[in-house]
Amino acid sequence: MFITSNEELAAAIERMRLAGTDLTECELKSAAGGFPKSTSETISAFANTFGGSLVFGIAEKGGFHAVDGLDVKLVQSGCAHAARELVDPPVAANILVLEFEGRPVVVANVPEAMASQKPCCVKKLGRMNGSFIRTGDGDHKMSLYEIDRFIENQSRNARNDAVIVPDATVEDLDENLVSGWLSRVRETTLGRSGTSDEDLMANRRVIAADDDGCLRPTLAGLLALGKYPQKYFPRLDIVFTSYPTPQKGEVSRDGNRFTDTMNIDGPIPAMVVDAVRAVSRNIRHGAIVKGALRENVPDYPLPVIREAVANALMHRDYSVDGQGTPVLIDLYPDRLEISNPGGLFGTLTIDQLGQRGGTSSRNQFLARILEDVPYTDYDGRTGRVVENRGSGYPTITRELEEALMGKPIIGNSLDRFDFMIRHRKMTDEEGKGYSRLNVESAILAYLTERESASTSEVARAAGISPKTARGYINKLVDEGVLEAIGTKNSPKRRYRINR
């Protein structure tokens, strides 16, 4: 939020007095001895982050008070020159003269640069040494990794997933995955009946020829269809950790820092399934009784976890600098966090997620391959790993709404994307428990919808043992509510509502 009035300026200074320092979005420069040479660095930092306000004429030392003798004309012209001539690309700063403590103050509001224009750098220092970013209350020189990510976003033509894996061979591809993928591609691609398997794989960048003409898997091909990609990229995996307390690093009463932890590896289709299963076995699966007996209600909807993990693996940063960082799944008593290296790609913003046109793929070849990879989900259903139609985030929000949960909390930066959902609150129906009365009511509702049912069918639907189900059924028969069909000890005996 920019400072455009005396009231907003006074409020910002009060916040800084309480904090005892500058703010991320506001930088103070006294300018008592002339125009500050570091101004262009701050302009670069604001432009590369989220924008911000430069305030000249207030000194942090001594309690954040206005200075005497500010040369307003000099500061105004200096700001305009720095924003237009000293940084590349030029920045359209909004320069105002305001008043604080009865003295004039110059405020330069610096907008965030467009994604296609980042990194904004100090011209005389060059892109590699003169690109700054705003962190905390200061301007910090960007790392080569951060600059590389900006350049990648600027080009909108990242090819990190299409690189050849030099030591890998086609033998590193999983025959079953490749066979299923080829079958699907031939079903859905017109005019490909006469194309060889090898050409189809080369056209989709599953494989490519190296300098010697030898066909080898690409990174995308190995991740989507490989037997064990971690043979060549050990950290392109998932690290799952379940913590006993809401604070990472704290130990439980029995002295454990983790309640469960594991490295999840293999090709992406396998990692997605194993990740969902890892979360599932570490969360509570509540049960509520509805018309058709018991409905399992996990702490976190499993389809949400599946979509979030698939998105993290598909959109993460696969550049050389990013290959040492795994996808992280951190489960706490009060929340679930999924993080991947590399923020949103291109011009895509958090607000555009789930909206029409709200998709932008850093790894275009990987995403295209995964569309056709056969996949058996955690619940046994078959399908494809991803749809790649911008439907993942709408699926997540819909599932969370149906579970009466809030929207995910998204954190996005240049080098990291964070997805967090808070623990589901117990519903009133769950709080009632799985009592004798609601089990009996559910059994009657189940049989009302059917001609008859066996003891085992009732037990399966209720999620209780056949012995327990038999006890409920016998009681209802004794009361005359249910009628038995067949002899008493027959394994084919069934039950129906006594009309």
Image (cartoon, rainbow, N blue to C red):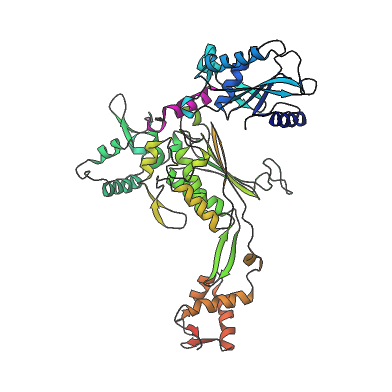
| Residue drawn at (40%, 46%) of the image | 389
Relative horizontal placement of residue 210, taking residue 121 as reference (left or right):
left
| Residue drawn at (53%, 58%) of the image | 402
Q: Nearer the viewer, residue 109 or 277?
A: 109
Q: Nearer the viewer, residue 291 or 458?
A: 291
Confirm whether residue 432 shows in the render. Answer: yes
Q: Which quadrant of the structure image shows residue 44?
A: top right
Which quadrant would the N terminus be assigned to in this image?
top right
Residue 308 pos. (x, y %): 50, 46
Residues drawn in magenta: 142-165
| Residue drawn at (63%, 65%) of the image | 430
Confirm whether residue 226 shows in the render. Answer: no
Residue 29 pos. (x, y %): 69, 18
Q: Nearer the viewer, residue 354 or 12?
A: 12
Question: Which residue ends up furthest to the right in the rendered image?
Answer: 62
Relative horizontal placement of residue 458, taking residue 372 as reference (left or right):
right
Residue 100 pos. (x, y %): 74, 24
Decide: is 169 above or below 186. Answer: above
Q: Is residue 73 magenta?
A: no
Q: Which quadrant of the structure image shows residue 12?
A: top right
Q: Nearer the viewer, residue 493 or 499?
A: 499
Residue 244 pos. (x, y %): 67, 48
Decide: is 454 above or below 323. Answer: below
Relative horizontal placement of residue 476, taking residue 62 as reference (left or right):
left
Q: Number of marks in the image?
A: 0
Q: Is residue 154 magenta?
A: yes
Magenta portion: prevailing SS class? helix
